[in-house]
Image (tube, rainbow, N blue to C red):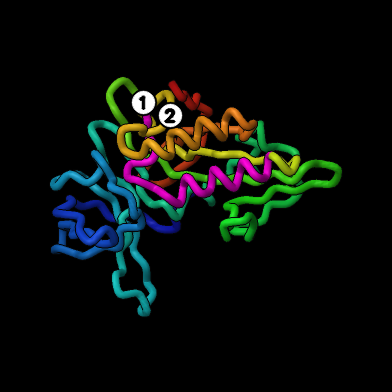
Amino acid sequence: MRFAAKLVEGRLIRRYQRFLADVQLEGGVVTAACPNTGALTGCSEPGSRVWLSESESAARKYRHTWEIVEVGKVLVGINTGLPNRLAEEAIAAGAIEELAGYTSVRREVAFGEERSRIDLLLEAPRRKACYVEVKNVTSAAAGGVALFPDCVSVRASKHLRELMRLKARGLRPVQLYCVQRGDVDEVRPADAIDPEYGRTLREAHAAGVEVMAYRAKVTARAITLERRIPVVCP
């Protein structure tokens, strides 16, 4: 996925009210939309280099959107609105071999007992429908371990329960982690942050839900899912 226009580089002053961030640009300070409701643990330190996209729409209250932050020597994509698009593009390009061979992709399809919407529904003649739930991963611990979630997420646990119900119905459910940073080699549940999610993930895996993670290459020009990494549930 290539950004439509060149991103604007700046320095993060602060992130606040979850949805806003003040950024120092060359021409002054701007308030940018922060498209991530998580804690952004390790990704929102004041003074960090950040990159913003800029909209030409006069209807937008905040013209800039925070897209990327530099953490150490790696760029991290923080926009949770991108993973579905990244996954869909990777599937179409054949980069996710496990999800190849489907002839149609539908987004945000209503399903389940808890009024959910699946991120991607893959379909093909004479194949089981494949329901793909995509989660964005930005948090990391020492040793190249990515962690999800970075705050308590009742919604994420709900989605796993819905996937287990799909499996019980004979369909194909997949939990796909989109890891928008290149310095990690595996994904683990953040048990210390959300133990309920960790328990539910292990239950879903035992029930036959496919759990996989793909790591992205993040640059200021493009973000691309490129390599599968293991999901470890110790």
Q: Which residues are magenta?
A: 145-167
Give residue 160's position: percent from left, percent from top.
54, 43
Q: Secondary structure at mark 1?
A: strand
The image shows a total of numbered marks equal to 2
Horizontal and vertical percent position of residue 234: 43, 21
- Image location (x, y in percent) of residue 187: 43, 29
Amino acid type of the residue that numbered disc 1 sits on in the rendered structure: Val
| Amino acid tagged 2 | Val
- Quote the CA–CA distance across marks 2 and 1: 6 Å
Q: Earlier in the sequence, mark 2 or mark 1?
A: 1
Tell me what residue is drawn at x 65 percent, y 44 percent. 165
Q: Is residue 27 left or right of residue 77?
A: left
Q: Secondary structure at mark 2?
A: strand
Q: Is residue 184 above or below residue 151?
A: above
User: x, y percentage for residue 182?
Assistant: 38, 31
| Quadrant of res 95 | top right
Q: Quadrant of residue 30?
A: bottom left
Residue visible at 50% across and 35% down in the picture: 201
Residue 156 drawn in magenta: yes
**Left or right of 77, for residue 17:** left
Q: Is 193 left or right of 85, judged from the image as shown?
A: left
Q: Residues within 10 Å of mark 2 (few under 14, many from 20)?
A: many
- Measured along the vertical axis of the image, is residue 185 above or below residue 223? above
Which residue is nearer to you in this view: 189 or 85? 189
Magenta run includes residue 55 = no
Magenta span: chief secondary structure: helix
- Is the C-beta separation of discs 2 and 1 under 8 Å? yes
Residue at image mark 2: 187
Q: Which residue was labeled with disc 1?
A: 145
